[in-house]
Image (tube, rainbow, N blue to C red):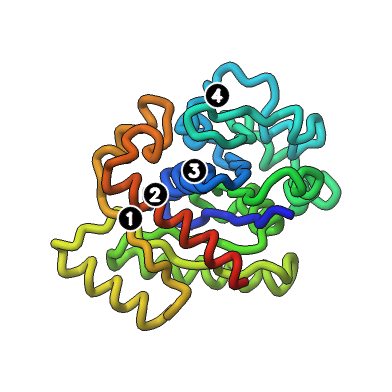
Amino acid sequence: MAKIFCVANQKGGVGKTTTAVNLAAGLAQLDQRVLLVDLDPQGNATMGAGINKAELESSVYQVLLGMADIPAARKRSESGRFDVVPANRELAGAEVEMVELENREKRLKDAIDAVAGDYDFVLIDCPPALSMLTLNGLCAAHGVIIPMQCEYYALEGLSDLVNTIKKVHAKLNPELKIIGLLRVMFDPRMTLSQQVSAQLEQHFGDKVFKTIIPRNVRLAEAPSYGMPGVSFDPASKGAQAYIAFGAEMVQRIKSM
């Protein structure tokens, strides 16, 4: 059965989507069967996987509202070699429409459970806010991967997210836990980055992934070509780091 992970952080611009797409591609290169669920109405993970969000007949919006199942909505990322449940702007309306639905925070969980046997990993790219969409992601997942930059404001937002995860664990999903913190867009030349990185290791211990994702231009360029950075330029430092992160995830799952 699949291990299901949210890639989440309430702070925007911290590399959530880059992490979700490239981890999916990195795991696929390690012969893992991967499903990426795009839960962000911006649809950036969908575009980053090479799928045109303007041409979707069904998406995660229809899945959440019970109008389609995942096999009907999923698409194949040819460049990344993984499946995607895509998203587009329609998804923004789901917040309001789901309010009156029964079992509203577990709609995604029910849909994923039906296909969990088809995959080794399910990755959920959450929007940068604590919304009904993020709540669906957290209720569906076994654990949370938190990408974060090593800067002061990132530490501020982290405590809010940890508290949210504790509340969801207590009230809605007893399986949910923090799998690990991933340091992204890391610049070793900056003293602050090194200081915050050391603070994270001191406070969170082995919850901090050993892999560090460097700041990398090729990772930033890849989405404009509709490809994960891992496929776009496999030799780049960013791609190599995400492949290493995929291997670390596989090892971490074995010890869970």
Q: CA distance from mark 1 to mark 4?
A: 27 Å
Q: Which residue is mark 4?
A: 53
Contact, mark 4 vs mark 2 (Cβ under 8 Å): no
Q: Earlier in the sequence, mark 4 or mark 3?
A: 3
Q: Nearer the viewer, mark 2 or mark 1?
A: 1
Mark number, residue 15:
2
Residue 73 visible (yes or no): yes
Identity of the amino acid at label 4?
Lys
In primary-sequence order, the first of circles 4 and 2 is 2
- Residue at horizontal 59 percent and vertical 42 percent from the top: 36
Residue 135 coordinates in the image, percent (x, y): 65, 55
- In the current view of this chain or complex, which residue is farthest to the right? 102
Q: Disc 4 and disc 2: Cα gap in Å?
A: 20 Å
Residue 167, horizontal then vertical, whole percent: 65, 71
Res 213 label: 1
Earlier residue among tags 1 and 3: 3
* First along the sequence among labels 1 and 4: 4
Residue behind mark 3: 29
Image quadrant where one finds the C terminus: bottom right
Label 2 vs label 3: CA separation?
21 Å
Distance from the alpha carbon under mark 1 to that under mark 3? 18 Å
Left or right of 66, for residue 191: left
Q: Amino acid at mark 2?
A: Gly
Amino acid type of the residue tagged 1 in the rendering: Ile
Question: On the picture, is 102 further left or further right than 239?
Answer: right
Separation (CA) of disc 4 from disc 3: 24 Å
Q: Are marks 2 and 1 in contact (CB under 8 Å)?
A: yes
> Secondary structure beneath disc 3?
helix
